[in-house]
Amino acid sequence: MARSKYPKFSEVQARADFPAILKHYGIKAKPAGDELVCSCPFHEDKTPSCFIHPEKRLFKCFGCGIGGNIFEFVRLKENLGDSGHELGIISKIIMDVCDIPLSDVTGNRASLRKPRGTSKVHTETTKKEKKVSEVNKPLSFQLHLAHNIPFLKSRGICEEAERVFGLGVAKRGTLRGRIAIPIHNRNGELVAYCGRFASEYPPEGEPRYKLPKNFNKGLELFNLHRAMALKLDYVVIVEGFWSAIRLHMLGVPCVALMGSHARQTQLDLIVTSGFKRAYVVLDGDEAGRLGAEKATIDLAGYMMVRRIDLPDGIKPDTMDQKWIDQLV
Ligand SMILES: [Zn+2]
């Protein structure tokens, strides 16, 4: 196997020593359970509110909401961007500070997508997902939809968004009367429609969202093909359709997990779609925070990851401008 002379991102991440990095920047941290806590270096922090998980090499400030992996930490400290060149600089800083020899971090590229410690998660998820479907076949039909939907207007979705996303009300079939949201695979092929009940309060027993039984949502990321077409080097990961639609229309490359838990295939799609940086912005609730933590850990070996926790009850489709400003 040919060995690259360049450091591998996931290998640097796996060997990085967070306490050494803190010391390098003159940041004093105290132990707090499995974690370390320090005054946040990224905002005016009166009480120590920045937590560092040395083993996972992640940080999270509960004051300003900034968090991510060790690469993101160094990038912010150095005020760097995320070009390939700058990522190289960050790797070099981490390797120097943590005394990591280049020979330790230049594994062969074929194993790039198998960082240590994630194989268990991978097998478990794969087993569960196999029961449903291993691939979502492109649909051979398109629904006839009625347009100009008052409910969408009430959700702040403009006609332009309706057109871009192909939204409409299904005239017949199992989704009759529901808002059909077309879901495409990475190649832009239509693989399913999700039927959203056309009001906030579906009658009892009626699900808010309906997906085809044989459709495996864990194999797709809503809006991935459009996010890729924007040709930016980052992606924002959200939970729901409306959040993705809103951010996309603001020019933010955004994909939706269609839930709060990122499945392995979805993470693989993010890692292999050419993005260098990911923002994890899930809903401001317990499930969202748990999902965000896991997704951040899983992506941390492959790219720069920043996690933004929204306040309780806030979602990316309702968050105000100050949060959006962090994403553009
Ligand atoms: Zn902070």
Image: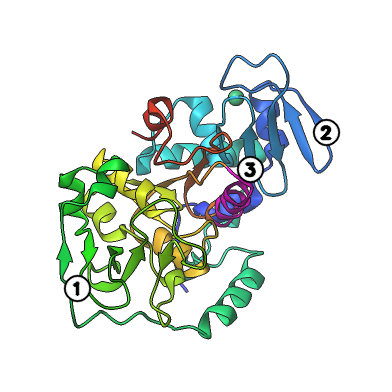
User: In the depicted view, which residue is nearer to us: 169 or 36?
Assistant: 169
> Mark 1 and mark 3: span between their CA atoms?
45 Å
Give coordinates of residue 86: x percent, y percent: 40, 37
**How many residues crowd mark 3 within 10 Å: few (<14), some (14–19), many (20+)?**
many
Residue at the front extreme of this rendering: 203
Give coordinates of residue 136: x percent, y percent: 35, 79
| Quadrant assignment for the C terminus | top left
Residue at (45, 56) in percent of width and height: 5
Q: Quadrant of ligand 1?
A: top right
Query: From the viewer's perspective, is the residue at label 2 or at label 1 nearer?
Result: 1
> Mark 2 and mark 1: span between their CA atoms?
57 Å
Pointers 1 and 3 in contact (C-beta within 8 Å): no
Classify mark 1: helix, strand or loop.
loop
Name the mark on residue 303: none
User: In the depicted view, which residue is nearer to us: 33 or 287?
Assistant: 287
From the image, give the main secondary structure of the stretch colored magenta: helix
Name the mark on residue 58: 3
Q: Magenta segment, which residues?
A: 285-298
